[in-house]
Amino acid sequence: MTIDAIVIGSGIGGLVTATQLAAKGAKVLVLERYSIPGGSAGYFERQGYRFDVGASMIFGLGQNGTTNLLTRALSAVNVSQEAIADPVQIHYHLPQGLDLKVDRVYEKFLQNLTAHFRHEEHGIRRFYDECQKVFNCLNNIDLLSLEEPRYLLRVFFQHPLACLGLVKYLPKNAGDIARRYIKDPQLLKFIDIECYCWSVVPADMTPMINAGMVFSDRHYGGVNYPKGGVGQIAQKLVEGLEKAGGQIQYQARVTKILTEQGRAVGVQLANGKVYRGKRIVSNATRWDTFQQLLPAEQIPHNEKKWQQNYQKSPSFLSLHMGVKQSVLAEGTECHHILLEEWEKMMAVEGTIFVSIPTLLDPDLAPSGYHIIHAFTPHWIDDWQGLAQTEYEAKKEKAAWRIIDRLEKIFPGLDAGLDYLEVGTPRTHRRFLGREDGTYGPIPRRKLPGLLKMPFNRTAIPGLYCVGDSTFPGQGLNAVAFSGFACAHRIAVDLGF
Ligand SMILES: Cc1cc2nc3c(=O)[nH]c(=O)nc-3n(C[C@H](O)[C@H](O)[C@H](O)COP(=O)(O)OP(=O)(O)OC[C@H]3O[C@@H](n4cnc5c(N)ncnc54)[C@H](O)[C@@H]3O)c2cc1C
């Protein structure tokens, strides 16, 4: 069989590319180094608990509009995923008693926030309304490849106002818009953490397009948890891929992208096996793609420039806990963010992110127990060069520091702990195949919005990148966007 596209990796970006292409009739082969699909949206099981590896606040599973890209990707290959609506996106526990919930209902969220900042009522509404304007532009158009002129022309003629709106916001960052309307320094810090909790940079460095998407879609399509755990999304995409004639191989680690006369023509696996394809797609990060799978000394000029603009964000220390039901008070929400001092928002172990998916889907834990996944930024450098015993002791110490802090919002956590597994940046690197276990690229300095983020084509003919180190960045719905765009561009290139 002649393979049209070989996709390296079965993260959501890779799987959306593969399923979109297979749905158009292309012959697709996905090669995944791990034993199951999903990457950072995967899962693992221990003692009756099914833990999400990473993502658990899921956008894109809504039913309406055009930005519900996970729902659309699944239905393109005739599969679907039951989703459980989350009534509150995040319960924030912030400095100076700023305790507030982001309700799914927009007006309720505005009321909750305004209750803390009465004097900024007008500014709050104007900022979040402006985010909605961005979202309305996005939610009006089919989201495909911005590198394909005929598509761009078509959407422009169909939706000129939406397109002009997006062009206006493309070089902007959320912080600039927030400061236009808001003056209160504590409220501006709140906008920072609203951005930081998914972009891992403050508002000034967070593209307005992404902010518009997140701050509005949570009240439109909403945050929805996939029944059976986040891993179901990838499993269903694989089911759809195979139904559409595509193939996936697990434990198939690509070690080399093969080139001939400068063009990508195939891949080589760790076991020496070679596959050739008309197009090669890398779902590995750009650092892994251009420094590991291709000779690092031949890194293309534009990739060097990209690395001058973007750096690897830290990885995480992750605590996967099984806890007695009694630890969680009645009315506890699924997602929490804990930060005690604003100055530490971006520091190692500053912000703690918490997800309790069993509040939405109790079947993920044994009866009478819940899952708590808590994670906080950590750099890989702090975990290198340790003897095994030192590594284990350091993990344990760090885990108890986090549990002690979480006791404030979940009193009795320590006593109610039934299971604990701790992952470090080394774990993320090992199981997710991501250099330094990074969460993804972050700007090195303030950049003009999304303008510097690369699309799917690369300087190497025949080679495309997809996933969180391409436009528009991290998050399942964002990498699904990148997958739609990548597949669209390849389909046009191959004449499908
Ligand atoms: C702790 C944590 C919490 C998060 N929380 C959220 C959240 O709540 N909501 C949200 O939307 N997003 C969240 N994210 C981000 C989101 O999970 C990622 O942005 C997204 O899953 C990345 O998808 P991807 O397709 O780019 O790549 P990945 O998920 O990294 O997948 C890449 C795949 O390629 C495979 N691979 C790599 N190299 C090779 C190779 N050489 N050969 C073969 N296979 C290879 C890997 O094994 C992996 O399966 C979170 C991430 C983390 C780590």
Image (tube, rainbow, N blue to C red):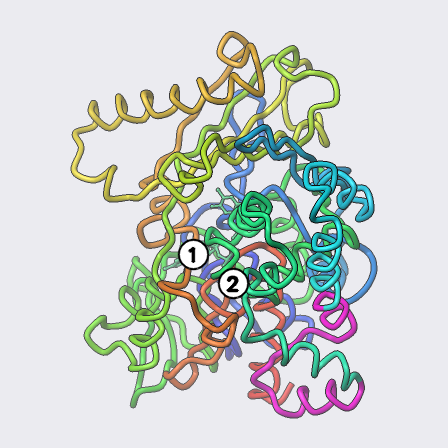
Pointer 1 or 2: first along the chain: 1
Q: Position of residue 397 (x, y in %)?
A: 31, 21
Label 1 sits on what residue type?
Gly
Q: Is residue 165 left or right of residue 442?
A: right
Label 2 sits on what residue type?
Gly
The residue located at (74%, 75%) in the rendering is 142
User: 335 or 175, which is in the foreground?
Assistant: 175
Q: Read off the magenta span.
A: 134-158
Cβ at disc 2 under 8 Å from ligand 1: yes
User: 182 or 110, which is in the foreground?
Assistant: 182
Asked if disc 1 and disc 2 are in contact, CB closer than 8 Å, the reply is yes
- Residue 265 image-quadrant placement: bottom left
- Above or below, 337 relative to 10: above
Q: Position of residue 88 (x, y in %)?
A: 73, 38
The residue located at (41%, 36%) in the rendering is 350
Q: Mark 2 falls on what kind of element?
A: loop
Which residue in the structure is indicated by mark 1? 440
| Residue 255 shows in this picture | yes
Q: Is residue 44 left or right of residue 154?
A: left
Q: Position of residue 417 (x, y in %)?
A: 51, 13
Cβ at disc 1 under 8 Å from ligand 1: yes
| Residue 1 shows in this picture | no
Q: Mark 1 falls on what kind of element?
A: loop
Real-space CA distance between mark 1 and mark 2, rounded to the nearest whole angstrom: 8 Å
